[in-house]
Image: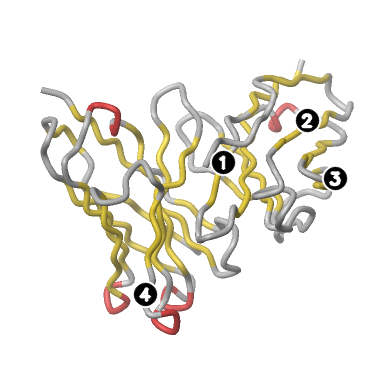
Amino acid sequence: EVQLVESGGGLVQPGGSLKLSCAASGFTFSGSAMHWVRQASGKGLEWLGRVRNKPNNYATAYAASVKGRFTISRDDSKTTAYLQMNSLKAEDTAVYFCSSSQDGYSFEYWGPGTLVTVSS
Amino acid sequence: QSALTQPPSASGSPGQSVTISCTGTSSDVGGYNYVSWYQKHPGKAPKRMIYEVSKRPSGVPDRFSGSKSGNTASLTVSGLQAEDEADYYCTSYAGSTFWVFGGGTKLTVL
């Protein structure tokens, strides 16, 4: 059974940092790209970025809204992807989802999400 | 990158068909056959329903179908069932390693 489970969410002050984890199982993690997507309350889904697999040199890409503040990485030995978030703003408050992609262009499996609240 | 345009709501009675549109530009929807659709129930993880415009993942009922014409993609749900009531999001690869989502459509089964 495929499972993606995000963790690390919580309350953080504006300007602070947080690192989310996405633990994966049940599929070939090393063969997949991993994406992060978020959803603010009452809003739609927003793509944040992705990290490709080793054959593709772990290449990363980011949405303009988070480029320079967020960093995506992965540890294939732990089948875990990460989202390091720095310089957090109130508008970063959202549920954060990780998703896997084996076909390269769609989001096949998703985790249940973890809530990040940026507030003083 | 601007979000893709979806109608905020759609509805239909059980057994009917409903189509949700997703309009982008030649830089995303019109430029690539990488449109996918996701079903999201409140508090749950999104579920992929359609990928590469019209392909259905294993386990997704054939009541769900996708198509594309020019810069507009569509998701059709035939034989509506109560459990189809959810939010639906389209997304498209937009080149230069970017993806863009639609704003979402709330599907109500009357």
Q: Chain of mark 4?
A: A
Q: Quadrant of residue B32?
A: bottom right
Which three-letter amino acid code belongs to the residue tagged 4? Tyr
Pointer 1 residue:
B101
Whole-number angstrom distance, CA of label 1 to CA of label 4? 23 Å
Which three-letter amino acid code belongs to the residue tagged 2? Gln
* Nearest-to-viewer mark from 2 and 1: 1
Are discs 1 and 3 both within one chain?
A: yes
Q: Chain of mark 2?
A: B
Q: Callout 2: helix, strand or loop? A: loop
Which of pointers 3 and 2 lies earlier in the amino acid sequence?
A: 3
Q: Crowdedness of circle 2 by 10 Å Cα count: few (<14), some, many (20+)?
A: some
Which of pointers 1 and 3 lies earlier in the amino acid sequence?
A: 3
Which three-letter amino acid code belongs to the residue tagged 3? Ser
Q: How far across and how far down the image is residue A10, in percent? A: 19, 36
- Numbered label attached to residue A58: 4
Q: Chain of mark 1?
A: B
Are discs 3 and 2 both within one chain?
A: yes
Are discs 2 and 4 both within one chain?
A: no
* Nearest-to-viewer mark from 3 and 2: 3
Q: Crowdedness of circle 3 by 10 Å Cα count: few (<14), some, many (20+)?
A: few
Left or right: B58 in relation to A50: right
Q: Callout 1: helix, strand or loop? A: strand
Q: Crowdedness of circle 4 by 10 Å Cα count: few (<14), some, many (20+)?
A: some
Pointer 3 residue:
B69
Please state which of residues A19 and A66 is positioned toward the viewer in this rendering: A66
Q: Callout 4: helix, strand or loop? A: loop
- Numbered label attached to residue B81: 2
